[in-house]
Amino acid sequence: MSIPADLRQSRPTISFEFFPPATPAGAETLWDAIRRLERVQPDFVSVTYGAGGTTQDRTVAVTERIAQETTLTAMAHLTCVGASVAQLRRVVGQYAAVGIRNILALRGDPPRGGDGRWVAHPEGLSRAEDLVALIKTLGDFTVGVAAFPDIHPESAGFDNDVEVLVRKADAGADLAVTQMVFDADSYLRLRDAVAARRDLPVAPGLMPVTNLKQIARMSELMGTPLPQPVVRRLTAVEGDPEAVRRVGVEIATELARRMLDEGAPGLHFITMNHSGATLEAFGNLGLAAVR
Ligand code: FAD
């Protein structure tokens, strides 16, 4: 079954996100996580594309290996950063050549160290919606896109974010996955506003926090502050790594339960290449039993 058809089924889809490792030790950790998470039969897994397109070869290699050596359906991320249209076509061709038919089409962030403004490659693309349209001309691909319940940092506001998602749907996007959610109401507001205009399944991103410093850094990079109640619960136990992890899994479980109760079509777990916290949240939700 295709990913969009899965997302429209009555049961929620489960997906896991990985990043391409930079070292042999990192690869071992990743593959251990993939093998453990494979056992719960997610609907798909995705592999990120490094900032500035820096991991292109590794993203292709990891996604290819997942597609060829596991039972998992793989989705590869792809960004427009620093790439001409000809280069983007080549990467899509590389994915197709190794049997990858699912791509998460992203604009990407401006490279770090610059003035923070987005600058497209002179022969490249400036918007994810253009990448969606390009990929759709290149073959029979399922295309996912990014969504931002807490409003994209460069966006004029909520209405613009909704409009951008509608435009991505009109360009051919089959599904959307959100930035990691820490406020279920923000997710539901965006999901409902999009649903009123287009039939685009929007799955929330979910990260069971295991490390307070790491999540604080990620939230800064995303330009989205963590909600105060979440910060309070995590900082109350910050001296005790085991307790941080337990509270992080609790928060993810509560958020997931609420969003599933409200009809979220799936959950996209950001695993950071580890299986433990994700499997705990998954188990707490009783998802294994209904799969
Ligand atoms: P766009 O949809 O092009 O939006 C970029 C900005 O332009 C937004 O502010 C948007 O509101 C505005 N905009 C777009 N179109 C219009 C329009 N027609 N009119 C007015 N304004 C418009 N980054 C990576 O580098 N690698 C990854 O693997 C990666 N994976 C991600 C996975 C998920 C699930 C998410 C949510 C994000 C991911 N990102 C990744 C980050 C993403 O690339 C950045 O957040 C980037 O800044 C925005 O990408 P986008 O695809 O949403 O861009």
Image (cartoon, grey):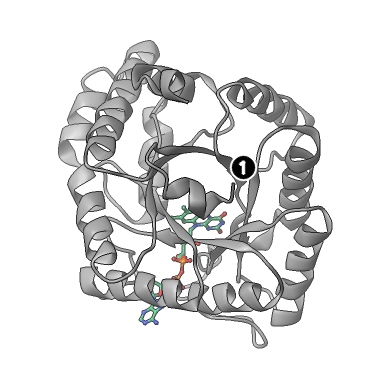
Quadrant position of residue 94: bottom right
Q: Is residue 288 above or below residue 192?
A: above
SS at mark 1? loop
Q: Amino acid at mark 1?
A: Phe
Q: Would you name the residue on which mark 1 appears? A: 19
**Pointer 1: residues within 10 angstroms few (<14), some, or many (20+)?**
many
Look at the image and tell me whether residue 150 can be seen: no
Q: Position of residue 268 (x, y in %)?
A: 45, 41
Q: Position of residue 163 (x, y in %)?
A: 31, 76
Look at the image and tell me whether residue 265 can be seen: yes
* Residue extending farthest right: 97
Ligand 1 location (quadrant): bottom left
Q: Residue placed at 56% from the left, 63% from the top?
A: 143
Is the residue marked 1 within 8 Å of ligand 1, measured from its CB?
yes
Q: Residue placed at 49% from the left, 63% from the top?
A: 174
Quadrant position of residue 222: bottom left
Q: Position of residue 111 (x, y in %)?
A: 56, 66
Q: Residue placed at 65% from the left, 64% from the top?
A: 141
In the image, taking residue 230 as reference, residue 36 lies left or right, namely: right
